[in-house]
Image (spheres, coloured by chain):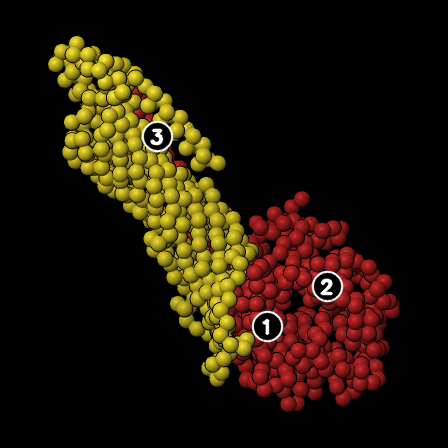
Amino acid sequence: MKGLLLIALVSFSLTSAFSQPGGNKSGSRKKNRVSYMTKDRMQREENKFLEKQWWLGLKGGTNLTKAIVTKHFSGVSPANYPIADALKEYEDFKSYGSQVTLEGTFYFRQLSLSLQPTYSRSRFVYSNYYAWSDPENAGHSLELHYRQTQKTEHLVIPLLVRYDITATRLRPFIQAGAFAALLINAGKEVTISGTDYASGGEHEFSGDPIIVGAKDLFAPAFYGLMGGVGAHYHQGNIRLSLDISYRYGLTNIVSPANRYGNDRLAGVGDAMDDMTMDNIVISVGCVFPLRFLGNAYKAVDNK
Amino acid sequence: MYRRFLLTLWLLPVLVMFFTSCVEETTPELEEEKFARLYDDNRFNESIIPIDVAQTTDGGYLVLAKRRLPESHFTGIYLMKVNSRGEFEAAQELDVQYVNPVGELMVADGNHYFFCMDELTVQTHLVRVSENLEDIAVNPLQAGLTYPAAASLQGNEFLLLSYDHMEKLSVLSLVRPDGVVTASQGYDIGVGDEVEEPIINHFIGGGKKFPFQTGRIPGGAYFFNGFYNYTFSLVFTDLNSEEPMGVVQGQHDDGGFSAVLPIVSTKFAAARFNFGDNFLLPNVVLPPNAITSSVDYPGNTLPELVPNATVKILRTTIDGTQTLVFASETRSKQIALLFYDEATGALLGSHYLGFSNPFEVASVIATEDDGLLVCGTAYLAGRFPRICLFKLPKEELAEKVRR
């Protein structure tokens, strides 16, 4: 719901922006207007525009997640085999998530300070494998595979410093900063499959997944650093952007107090590890300037 | 606008401080307060079914369990030690000569004790276990007591119920930790093989299990829940006469008490079964000097419980209220905890443990940090019986009983 509100807000802002005068459509009229300006005045306005500007925009894209375990926990405690055999196996950067970002940037002489509140959905997967066997009878064997998918929704609030490497129409940039991620919702899906060799043959089976809301299992917030590269392409009044960022989580994303709080998950021996979460975030979008557009000036930053 | 923006930057340190205070960290206290553990054993043919659990002086827990013995009619003995966070530390399987472990797991002289029997002679043995499982001593009782069925700690002695298959007697005895029997009295179960059959089946793996129990009214009579005069009965005695002081008769082997907890004088918390039905009696008066029938005490019926359900009763204080915790198992194979006000017998709340796999209750104890530890059987993969422990913190319990 919160995500929808965010999207609606951004859409409204963009619609308003594109409806402002000064777009490329009024071609010949603007040319006439420009012809009345002196070259000095044009240059002054151009410099103002370039040196100090607010940008607002929307971007969205996909993300990949890696969970980094800081402390192992398990609901299953082996009594006659090494605990390492009961540890989870994580799939790193394999499950796609998505995000949509409202970007507000203050630009000043190739440096920018950017606040980018993001509604981010991430997924990561881990697996457990258990086997029971009888050394004296190979037929007495059962293997179970638990595949657990975590789906989280966070409001990520990064504050970034960006540097435009060139001042050309295509502007590559680098950016770095910190972020806070506030939990909106979370869920878990456990799929149990296995192979039973003991019931008269090799029988592979798979049960219906256990799907539970898991908001309580995750920390209400976590924090981290992020950095990345990207490029802007100036097109008329707007800038099209593509950026790739790495979000590096610094704090635990799991709620230790509620680790065993979900009875359905505890019943299958699941207990989440303490972990941080890293994301590779790929976004495309566009931003538009907030200054000068209310006057008669068109975008002059069109080198 | 620019200045306003710069001013807002001053809010950043405040925000950082706020966010930092929200960081979630695992602490040793958190790990001890609440956990849920399934203790797996990867042997296909192994069955480990817990009987009782006790907290150790290091904050950990010692679990007494029985295990399936392929070569025997009886169950073997399995002991497991976990730390205060429920993490596995050690396990011991006693020699297959010793079978039929019997709860409670009793603490005396800094050691833990329980009874078992010799597989061949069926003579009762007392087992002394150190907390770390490194020192285990099994000694036969001096008196020839056979088929131990239940035991409890009464003062410095153990109150043992056993079955004398030669004389067809239920025998109640007081046993010192050194194995000396200081008092013993037998009670006639009746004549005929059909009376003895359910008792022997109880001891054999796979047979119907009966809720044998011993105890004592505070400062008053001893009692046992066992077979007497052809029925599964609650028998009160002073251990001086073969005639009981009083009896609450069951319905042959189809009815009787499934758990009894004396509160004070004639006031009890109890649960009974009757041809599969279950009734909880959180506040019942049982006269120890009269002959009555278990069906005289109706109680709260609980159709959600499995037929003839195992019931464990714990008396404890939760959120300042003297509370009775009834632990049992549901038809959906969960462990049910029902909280009753001891003073009024009113239901305060309930809590259910275990999903996805079948679960059965074995024991529930109060822990040093005012929480609860529930010990039970989890059928991993739906088929392998293994020990499970659920530790519940006092805050969560308080929420359960708060109205």
Gap between marks 2 and 1 measured at Cα: 23 Å
- Residue B242 in the image, given as x and y percentages of width and height: 83, 79
Identify the residue at image location x=32%, y=19%.
Answer: A20
Mark number for residue B49? 1
Q: Secondary structure at mark 2?
A: strand
Task: Residue at 79%, 58% (x, y): give it.
Answer: B299
Q: Which residue is mark 3?
A: B11
Tell me what residue is drawn at x 70 percent, y 84 percent.
B145
Above or below, A86 against A122 in this view is: below
| Residue B384 percent location from the top left of the image | 55, 71
Farthest-out residue, bottom: B120
Contact between marks 2 and 3 (CB within 8 A): the answer is no
Q: Is residue B225 left or right of residue A54?
A: right
Residue drawn 32% across the image and 30% down it: A57
Q: Are marks 3 and 1 in contact (CB under 8 Å)?
A: no
Categorize mark 3 by other alpha carbons within 10 Å: few (<14), some (14-19), many (20+): few
